[in-house]
Image: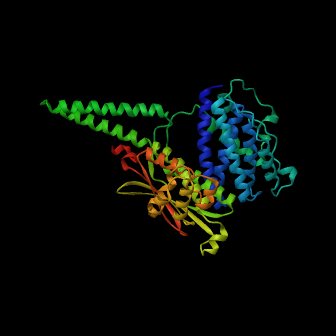
Amino acid sequence: MDDEIIREFLIESNEGLARFEQDMLELEKQPQDADLLAGVFRTIHTIKGTCGFLGFDHLRRITHIAEHILSQLREGELTLSSSLVSLILETADAIKAVLETIAATGTEGRETYGNLCARLKRASDGGKQSPASSAPPAVRPVQTAAVSYFRHDFQPASPADRSDALPPAEQTRSKPELTSSAHPTQPVKPAAEGQTLRIDVALFDRLLSLASELSSVNGVIQQRAYSRDNLPFHTECQRLNLIASQIQDALLKARMQPMNLLSGKLQRLVRHLAISCGKQIALELDGIETELDKTVIDAISDPLTHLVRNACDHGIEEPDARVSAGKPLEAKVSLRIFYESDGLNIEIKDDGRGIDTQKLKQRAVQSGIIQVEYAAGMTDKEALQLIFLPGLSTAEEVTTISGRGVGMDVVKTNVERIGGRIRISTKLGRGTTFRITVPTMLSYPALR
């Protein structure tokens, strides 16, 4: 089997699943949005069809049942509920796990996800249809002419293997979608706004390095040009200088990616923690479409995830405590991205219990991190810095100081590794704000 076809399948599937998660979370808020539902259906449908061509039977089985549930939702035979959203998102996790195994080993691995498939079938049987008619049909590969591009051993399909194995509502949709989405030899269209081109990171960095060398050579040529009394030569040198600058700027801008690539991950995290902890939490996003260099996004992804997790799990009070404190039952965690004179700022704020600096100092003394005398002379601002020190991440600390010492040393290290800094402000009973500041020159390397 062609490795390049497998690679393309993995890339497209993972990109589709990234959109799938965001769309599912949005669909939970807007269950009547037909466009969102159609989008998530197409993603699963495409993965199912292509993995069938490639012989990935476990993946085809999972996606086939999930596709049937999405079809039932689209036809109004099932009603979208929070538990069903969780099950569908869990299915997306399983699909991603199989894709990772394929990428690492070339096979699907031994995990068949039988329990997940059984729960998906039970969810499907909960529709308005009778159990006999609502159960998804037997999983069979849907053979079309497009198969010849994926498998050289293709044989004409028998009648039982053709589209009559699909639910009636899908028979007319399957063939054109599978043929167009899975075709690996489509002609390359001229570049246009909105189109994208995948490129290996190492190759891209090589191009960037060559552009930098071109800029350096151009500088030498410019200096020599001024020593010659030759107007046409001067003109061509100026043109070369402009072209070299434009190439470098274009390549640098190509590394820029919107922060909203992380929004689906964070929204799902907040949803999961709210359900797990029995809390009502709304995640507010502001400035999430700000573009950053991919290196920066990769570096701050884990710190942001950790801070949002801490805010939900430990910063936000239990519902009864919020009501007793006169707060709204629904807590708020916000992620705001904005520019100031000191650079790009990423702010994570919650309206929870805040950090008790006195208890924080007491815990630090008990852990032997600081002496009693030193703790007594510390200001609240100085005390807050204690959470960035390792050694406060015990179970007792989670209860006493809201768990904010767990892993915060790693958060600080990762932020500082890219030249950034992290600050804290808190008010007891009102909430806590973490602000990460990244130098502008790092977030927009084209300005360097």
Residue at 31%, 39% (x, y): give it: 245
Picture quarter containing residue 229?
top left
Of the pair 395 and 24, the residue shown nearer to us = 395
Question: Position of 263 compared to 135: left or right?
Answer: left
How many badges with numbers are in the image? 0
* Residue 342 visible (yes or no): yes
Q: x, y (%) of residue 94?
A: 70, 43
Q: x, y (%) of residue 304?
A: 53, 52
Question: Position of 126 compared to 102: left or right?
Answer: right
Picture quarter containing residue 228?
top left
Q: Residue furthest top?
A: 153
Residue 339 vs 446, above or below: the answer is: below
Q: Quadrant of the C terminus?
A: top left
Residue at 54%, 50% (x, y): give it: 262
Q: Residue furthest left?
A: 229
Q: Quadrant of the N terminus?
A: top right
Of the pair 238 and 443, the residue shown nearer to us = 443
Residue 21 vs 218, above or below: the answer is: below
Of the pair 272 and 415, the residue shown nearer to us = 415
Q: x, y (%) of residue 399?
A: 63, 60
Of the pair 419 and 164, the residue shown nearer to us = 419
* Residue 194 visible (yes or no): no
